[in-house]
Amino acid sequence: MNPRFEEVRTEASAAITEDDLRSVYTGIIHEDGRHEYYFGNDTEEAAELREAAAIQLGMLLRVLADRSDSSVDELTTLAAERAEQMELR
């Protein structure tokens, strides 16, 4: 296993147990192609939910663009296509 991946997984596991979180998203892709996603927010307000989701999507897109040598626009288009294909579970 990639040692950096193990380090990030450990850091993320510790971070999501903190008490002062407002929003949490975790996406898991298994080696066999299965995927799981968990999304929760400590808000009832639609505007706050949109803002939290936009921040999380922006963070993920920025990191993926940097690490994959892709543009944010390329990843956004690809992600929108995949989102249309996914079933919400």
Image (cartoon, helix red, strand yellow):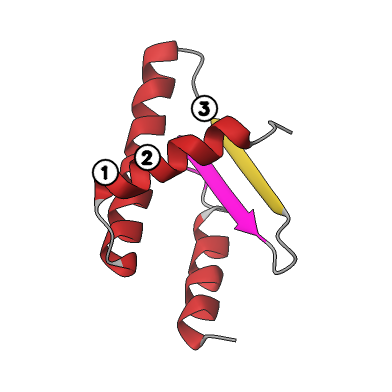
Residue positioned 45% across, 82% down in the render: 4
Report whether residue 78 is seen. Answer: yes
Q: Is residue 62 magenta?
A: no
Q: Is residue 25 magenta?
A: yes
The answer to whether mark 2 and mark 1 are in CB contact below 8 A is: yes
Residue labelled with disc 2:
77
Residue 38 at x, y = what percent? 63, 41
Residue labelled with disc 1:
73
**Can you say which quadrant of the picture contains the N terminus?**
bottom right
Image position of 13 (left or right of 71): right
Label 3 secondary element = loop
Q: Give the mark, 2 or 3, whose residue is nearer the N terminus.
A: 3
Residue labelled with disc 3:
42
Q: Amino acid at mark 2?
A: Thr
Give the residues drawn in magenta, as a range. Answer: 19-29
Q: CA distance from mark 1 to mark 3?
A: 29 Å
Q: Amino acid at mark 1?
A: Asp
The answer to whether mark 1 and mark 3 are in CB contact below 8 A is: no
Q: Amino acid at mark 3?
A: Asp
